[in-house]
Amino acid sequence: MSTVARDLPRIETLSQSQQRGVDCVFCGITLTPRTAVDLGPRRLRILGHVTHWYPRACGHHPVMAEYLALIVHTQDCPTCLDGCATGDRLRRADREARR
């Protein structure tokens, strides 16, 4: 399990809507396509089977959401240090959110 996953609320403490990405994992507000920030897929082991869940956050948590998305992305991206479009977009969004 990555450090990023520990920064999110534990999945068993979340509602079904939060687990499915319908509601924000931090505050529970219902998300729309415009307000949702994808935090990337997370591996989850249930009864010996590995599956994924897809947490999302709202715009009220932009710094945390973008920071987590950036960490998740850079962990799996071999070209991110050289500059990739997704990493660049997430870094820009993170800088904007901190202003």
Image: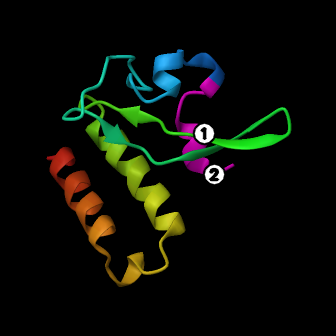
Q: Amino acid at mark 2?
A: Ser
Which residue lies most toward the bottom here?
Answer: 82
Spatial distance from mark 2 to mark 1, Cα to Cα? 7 Å
Instruction: Bin the neighbour count of mark 2 within 10 Å (Cα to Cα): few under 14, some 14-19, many 20 and up.
Output: few
Which residue is at 49% across, 39% downward?
54
**Relative to the observer, which residue lies in front, 17 or 37?**
17
Task: Name the image quarter holding residue 52.
Answer: top right
Q: Amino acid at mark 1?
A: Arg
Magenta highlight range: 1-11
Task: Name the image quarter holding residue 37.
Answer: top left
Instruction: Bin the neighbour count of mark 1 within 10 Å (Cα to Cα): few under 14, some 14-19, many 20 and up.
Output: few
**Relative to the observer, which residue lies in front, 34 or 71?**
34
Which residue is at 15% across, 51% downward?
96
Answer with left or right where residue 63 lies relative to residue 81.
Answer: left
Which residue is at 49% across, 79% downward?
78
Q: Which mark is residue 79?
A: none
Q: Are marks 2 and 1 in contact (CB under 8 Å)?
A: yes
Image x and y of residue 38, in percent: 37, 43
Answer with left or right where residue 14 lies relative to residue 12.
Answer: left
Location of mark 1 (residue): 6
Task: Name the image quarter holding residue 79.
Answer: bottom left
Which residue lies most toward the right here?
Answer: 48
Image x and y of residue 3, in percent: 60, 49
Indicate whether 7 appears above or below 86.
Answer: above
Image x and y of residue 80, in percent: 40, 75
Indicate whether 96 appears above or below 63.
Answer: below
Which residue is at 46% across, 19% downward?
17
Q: Which mark is residue 2?
A: 2
Q: Is residue 5 magenta?
A: yes
Q: Is residue 47 magenta?
A: no
**Relative to the observer, which residue lies in front, 72 or 35?**
35
Label 1: which secondary element: helix
